[in-house]
Image (cartoon, rainbow, N blue to C red):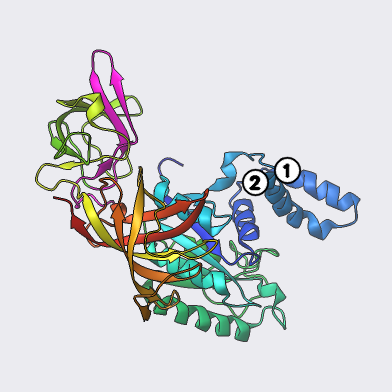
């Protein structure tokens, strides 16, 4: 596996459109599901005279075990194709998906949007499409699933109708044609997942797995200035202060002078990188995605903390006095008005921020302005808002450094909203 390029794949779509079944089917077709378990289910199904249910049972058992909190062998969430090695970012509900996408180590490189061909576009299909776009997922397969269930079964006309509907939606939120692939599939039966087109002899395009191999590994953002959010800070005897975290953008080399912001030191703490370690080995340079510990000279442990960000002296991280953002409200029990102060989760920082002003309400399907200066926004709304952090925090405009411009908004133990920073008013 190690010699293949790795990608993070998120599978999204309306509830009940067959996400789990498609995941199960992909794992099965790529040999990730242990044969002995498959045989066991087949035996049980046969004994009950329900052979055709064997597959469904696999998916149900996967699902049931997950609901019972039993972790099934992690292999289930990883698979290889001919070209790549994938990790599936599991998205049971879109709130979890959003939090993983923003604060996890799992920025999605690509998405599969599952849409049931008999039903077509539903409310959550629209939300997920808008979110994927907002959060920077640049390539997507639209899997038109349940083709075995159209009337008549495997109906090409129904595929074309729904494809057109999803295509319109994708264009309206800003996807370009070369970022999209449309594939008909029956995850339940297995038609057009791997090699076999099954009963869709009219289909001349790719199967799901062939389409997955057409994804492109995104370039690592090494051309952007260094941004290194801190996860933890350790003091190691005989070594000194060792901050740890994942590099988001740019390149880090020993000898570099860096500035940490906001930091406990007014104006930012400055230190020099002596050595960089990854997996207990010294490395000559660190690039985006690398999780590193760095031996810093000139910085005391109490000067920096989790949520600070390091950057080069000539282009240090931006500390916001306020910022303008585009958000989508995913789940709020009542309404959001000016003055609301939930916690913003952004890379490793968690900072309470105040909604200073709701400037515009947008149509979440198209991003067009629906209302200027609305009194409130609620679940399902998209909006442009002005935000004021209650204490100093680093955030970058998504035009400059998108990796540090994404955030999730959490309150009452759940993800209330998600968004991206459009512009920053810098704190002086």
Q: Nearer the viewer, residue 58 or 2?
A: 58
Q: Nearer the viewer, residue 20 or 373?
A: 373
Image quadrant assignment for residue 118 = bottom right
Q: Is residue 255 above or below residue 317?
A: above
Residue 288 visible, this angle: yes
Say the numbered circle drawn on residue 388.
none
Q: Is residue 424 above or below residue 228?
A: below
Say the numbered circle drawn on residue 33.
2
Secondary-structure class at tag 1: helix
Q: Is residue 337 above or below residue 157?
A: above
Q: Is residue 304 left or right of residue 254?
A: right
Q: Residues within 10 Å of mark 2 (few under 14, many from 20)?
A: some
Q: Residue 12: give x, y in percent of width and height.
A: 53, 62
Residue indicated by mark 1: 37
Q: Is residue 253 left or right of residue 180?
A: left
Q: Nearer the viewer, residue 73 or 196?
A: 73
Q: Residue 274: give x, y in percent of width and height.
A: 17, 26
The residue shown at (68%, 47%) is 67
From this viewpoint, which residue is outermost toward the left? 314
The residue shown at (90%, 56%) is 49
Residue 302: say if magenta. no
Find the distance from the CA under tag 2 to the CA under tag 1.
Answer: 8 Å
- For the record, the magenta segment spans 220-249
Image quadrant assignment for residue 109 = bottom left
Q: Is residue 352 above or below residue 302?
A: below
Q: Residue 108: give x, y in percent of width and height.
A: 42, 55
Q: Residue 66: give x, y in percent of width and height.
A: 66, 46
Q: Is residue 241 left or right of residue 11?
A: left
Secondary-structure class at tag 2: loop
Q: Are marks 2 and 1 in contact (CB under 8 Å)?
A: yes
């Amino acid at each position: 596996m190690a010699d293949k390029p790795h990608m993070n794949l998120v599978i999204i779509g309306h509830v009940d459109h067959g996400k789990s079944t498609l995941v199960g089917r992909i794992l099965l077709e790529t040999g990730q599901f242990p044969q002995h378990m498959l045989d066991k289910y087949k035996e049980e199904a046969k004994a009950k005279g329900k052979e055709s249910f064997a597959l469904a049972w696999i998916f149900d058992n996967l699902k049931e075990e997950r609901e019972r909190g039993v972790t099934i062998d992690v292999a289930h969430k990883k698979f290889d194709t001919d070209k790549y090695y994938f990790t599936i970012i599991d998205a049971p509900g879109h709130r979890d998906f959003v939090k993983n996408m923003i604060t996890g180590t799992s920025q999605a490189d690509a998405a599969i949007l599952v849409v049931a061909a008999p039903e077509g576009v539903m409310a959550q299909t629209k939300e997920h499409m808008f979110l994927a776009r907002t959060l920077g997922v640049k390539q997507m397969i639209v899997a038109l699933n349940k083709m075995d269930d159209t009337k008549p079964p495997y109906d090409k006309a129904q595929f074309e109708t729904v494809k057109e509907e999803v295509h319109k939606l994708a264009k309206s939120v800003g996807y370009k044609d070369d970022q999209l692939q449309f594939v008909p599939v029956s995850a339940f039966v297995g038609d057009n997942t791997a090699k076999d087109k099954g009963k869709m002899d009219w289909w001349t395009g790719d199967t799901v797995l062939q389409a997955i191999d057409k994804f492109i590994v995104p370039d690592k953002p090494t051309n952007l200035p260094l941004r290194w959010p801190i996860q933890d800070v350790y003091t190691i005897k005989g070594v000194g202060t060792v901050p740890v975290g994942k590099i988001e953008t740019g390149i880090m080399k020993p000898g570099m002078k860096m500035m940490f912001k906001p930091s406990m030191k007014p104006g930012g703490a400055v230190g020099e990188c002596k050595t960089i370690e990854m997996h207990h080995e010294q490395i000559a340079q660190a690039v985006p995605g690398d999780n590193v510990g760095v031996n810093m000279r000139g910085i005391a442990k109490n000067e920096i903390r989790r949520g600070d960000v390091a950057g080069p002296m000539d282009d240090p991280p931006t500390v916001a006095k306020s910022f303008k953002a585009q958000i989508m409200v995913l789940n709020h029990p009542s309404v959001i008005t000016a003055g609301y102060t939930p916690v913003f989760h952004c890379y490793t920082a968690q900072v309470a921020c105040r909604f200073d002003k709701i400037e515009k309400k947008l149509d979440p399907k198209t991003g067009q302005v629906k209302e200027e200066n609305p009194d409130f926004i609620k679940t399902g709304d998209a909006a442009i808002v002005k935000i004021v952090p209650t204490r100093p925090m680093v955030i970058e405009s998504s035009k400059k450094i998108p990796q540090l411009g994404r955030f999730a908004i959490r309150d009452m133990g759940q993800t209330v909203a998600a968004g991206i920073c459009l512009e920053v008013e810098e704190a002086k």
